[in-house]
Image (spheres, rainbow, N blue to C red):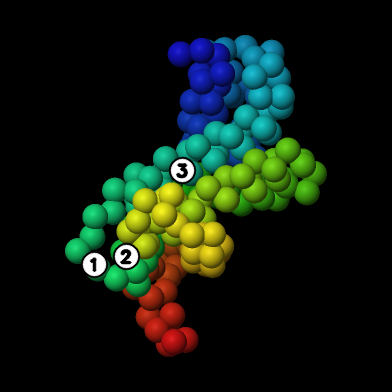
Amino acid sequence: MGHKQQLLEGAKRCLYTKGYARTTARDIVAESGTNLASIGYHYGSKEALLTAAMIEAAGEWVDRVAGSLKSDRDTPMGRFEETMNRLARSYPEVRTLVAANFEALAQMDRQPELRAQLVEGHAAARRALAAVVLDVPEEEVTPEQESELGGLLLALIPGTMALFLIDPDRGPDGTGLAAGMRHLA
């Protein structure tokens, strides 16, 4: 494994243990077994490295939780409910990563490269989330489904994450969200 990948893996471990805001370049170097100069050479800045690590870690987490979803539910609403339930149940095991998402968002206005990485990561997430709920390959998700359904899911996930961080015992799960959507319908 080269320095670039070692840095990424070390940064992911730091996100899980320290979060985004409390991770230093020295922490990443200690975790990765590399050197400080490698961060600038491969990623340009500690923030760019941490953002890349956060996007990858979040993608791995969602893939682990929702990507293997093979539910007996045969409707998009049923798959939505099951996906959101699985995500909500996983929040306690990835609490620091959940909090790191919000720490990164707080840095976005001061770091244009961070915003660009988040925009790119969110575009991929909208498509992937829509594909899971529709039970189709990502390449079959239409631009409208990506924008509308993927956008809805992408808006709901950070909302449920924030509510979990505030009050872990009363945050909504997929069952509650699906019931609320049925009230709207």
Residue farthest along the right direction in this orientation: 110
Q: Tag 3: residue type? A: Gly
Amino acid type at image mark 1: Arg
Q: Where is residue 175 in the image (x, y as percent from the top left)?
A: 34, 73
Question: Is mark 2 in CB contact (under 8 Å) with mark 1?
Answer: yes
Kindly identify which residue carries mark 2. 79
In the image, what residue type sits under mark 2?
Arg
Given residues 100 and 175, the one toward you in this image is 175
Q: Mark 1 points at which residue?
A: 73
Give the residue at mark 3: 59
- From mark 3 to mark 1, how far is it between C-alphas? 23 Å
Mark 3 vs mark 1: in front: 1
Q: Is residue 70 above or below residue 183?
A: above
Q: Distance between the residues labelled 2 and 1?
A: 6 Å
First reached walking from the N terminus: tag 3 or tag 1: 3
Secondary structure of the residue carrying tag 1 is: loop
- Measured in 3D between alpha carbons, the distance from the residue under mark 3 to the one under mark 2, in whole angstroms, is 19 Å
Where is residue 143, by image quadrant?
A: bottom right
Picture coordinates of residue 106 (x, y %)? 70, 50
Res 31 visible: no
Number of marks: 3
Secondary structure, mark 2, is helix
User: Which residue shows up at 67% across the image and 32% down it?
Assistant: 48
Of labels 3 and 2, earlier in sequence is 3
